[in-house]
Image (tube, rainbow, N blue to C red):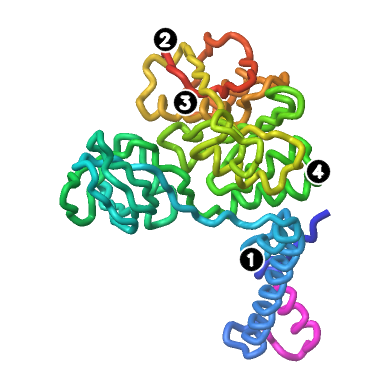
Amino acid sequence: MPYPRPTLSDLRARVASDITSGLPTADGLLRFSNLQITGKAVAGLAYLNYGYLDWIAKQGVPYTASGEFLYAWGAMKNVYPKSPTVASGAVTFPGTPGVIVPAGTQVVRSDAATFTTQASATVGTDSTLVVQVTADLAGEAGNTPVGGLMTLGTSITGVQSTGAVTAVITGGADQELDEAFFGRMLAAYQSTPNGGSDNDYVNWALDVPGVTRAWCMPNGFGTGTVVVYSMLDDANAAYGGFPQGTNGISSSDNRATSGNLAAGDQLIIANSVYIQQPVTAMVYHCAPIAAPIAWTITGLIGASTATRTAVAAAISGVLFDQGAPLADGSSVDVSDVGAAISAIAGTQGFVITSPVANIPNTLGHLPTLGVITYG
């Protein structure tokens, strides 16, 4: 049973009652009485003490802790806030064969975001220069899709100033918010490490900056293998949250070859998980395959644009919570989608006519929002 914390008004009334009963010959309730003013001051101090005790009680358990106390509880389970990371990728410029561009050359994106080349590069015989660049500032803002326009920060003789991204610039992630950290910290308390259980692989993947969801499939590619699927819903929002790279294993694994080595986001995750995983498992890190689900909803033919946007967001939210690239018998419940839409004002009387049954999750495929048809 929770302790009923008294309000400030209750405390003032109690103090005034104590003063009146303790000094029956004095009237301590007059508006400008010294006793009344002193009583209000005492009640205010007591109220502050109650508030401080409430705050202490909240910081005393992981479930309600905040700020540095939340981080301290996480540190006890070896869970720390994810630091921001910088994005990297490749940019191509036309040029004269043989011309060398030194490391440290600045490259500027069309929105003035700057990148720096990480190594010297030479224009090839095909008159193209490919430079590996890293964003100068950490965060999701550095991620750039293929085709993004780039310009050399300084003119270099023999190299055209205007180029484009040819290998997606990815890997940038913002500082983790307390809400996301809280979820990982709580999962660490709820799931005791088991030397390589399903939950261990999921938690190891979630520790990587930018990763927001992860799933584990034991023996996914045969006996002795583990397949980990990950999503970067915020960092890779431009791609629907899907990792950008090549599926495969860590470059630190001595069994890695050109045929099974991960690249891009998958390699970043693989290398991070490798230092914690059991040495015997061959762990593949993969991007789920998008499986768009089409919806037909009747009764909302006259719905406004705002309502339709809210309906799309509601369906996406259920898919986010219940969708998984696993063949584990789970599914996306159409009834939950209906409940989410019902919570939106102005949607009374709608009926979901397609799909007609719950959507089963399948291995390697992640349900996403498809076309919504209103009838």
Observer-nearest of 84 and 338: 84
User: Where residue 119 is drawn, which disc sits there?
Assistant: none
Q: Write down the residue under mark 1.
A: 68
Report whether residue 317 is seen.
Answer: no
Q: Which amino acid does label 2 sit on?
A: Gly
Gap in angstroms between the C-alphas marked 3 and 2: 14 Å
Residue 199: which quarter of the image? top right
* Residue ID at (23%, 55%): 153
Alpha carbon separation for disc pair 3 and 4: 42 Å
Sequence-first tag of 4 and 2: 4
Residue 375 is tagged as 2
Mark 4 → mark 2, Cα distance in angstroms: 52 Å
Q: Which of marks 1 and 3 is in front?
A: 1
Which range is magenta? 11-28
| Residue carrying label 4 | 195
Who is closer to the viewer here, 250 or 242?
250
Residue 136 vertical position relative to residue 235 in the rendered view, above or below: below
Identify residue for label 3.
311
Crowdedness of circle 4 by 10 Å Cα count: few (<14), some, many (20+)? few
Which comes sooner in the sequence, label 3 or label 4?
4
Side of 284 relative to 200 (left or right): left
Position of residue 3 measured from the top left corner of the image (x, y, whole percent): 79, 60
- Quadrant housing the N terminus: bottom right
Looking at marks 2 and 1 on the same chain, the residue that comes earlier in the sequence is marked by: 1
Looking at the picture, how far across and down is residue 205, in whole percent?
64, 42
**Percent coordinates x, y for residue 99 in the rendering:** 23, 48
* Amino acid type shown at disc 1: Glu
